[in-house]
Image (cartoon, helix red, strand yellow):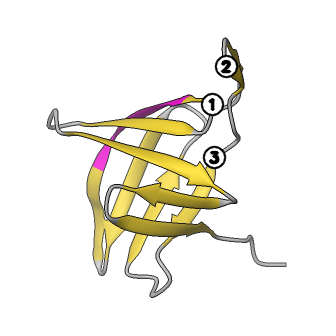
Amino acid sequence: MTSDSANGPDIDIVGMWVTADGYIRQELRADGRYDEARGRRASAYTGRYTVTGSHIDYVDDTGFTATGDVRDGVLYHEHLVLYREQPAP
């Protein structure tokens, strides 16, 4: 999701983000939805997100909320550190 906001353009975060061990995989979709897998559990968490600058606000489909920030190409989501997965060549 990218758009212009009062604080400048929002970062482009669409794609797959994964922890270093690959256990948590968070797909941030262009439609403002996310789908997070944990281990073998697909769609462990799903919901919507909004981006303001480099800050992300998440609202899980159950109503749970969380936040994240992207710094130097790394997504810091609550206690998690996720890296953008590069598409296979």
> Seen in the image, is 30 located left or right of residue 66?
right
Which residue has dot 1 on it? 53
Distance from the alpha carbon under mark 3 to that under mark 1: 14 Å
Which residue has dot 2 on it? 7
- Within 10 Å of disc 1 (Cα), the crowding (few <14, some 14-19, many 20+) is some
**Label 2's element?**
loop
Position of residue 16 measured from the top left corner of the image (x, y, whole percent): 57, 61
Give the residue displayed 68% in from the left and 30% down from the top: 10
Which residue has dot 3 on it? 14
Which of labels 3 and 1 is toward the front? 1
Q: Earlier in the sequence, mark 3 or mark 1?
A: 3
The C terminus lies in quadrant: bottom right
Residue 31 falls inside the magenta stretch: no
What residue occupies the far right of the structure in this picture? 89
Disc 2 residue type?
Asn
Q: Are marks 1 and 2 in contact (CB under 8 Å)?
A: yes
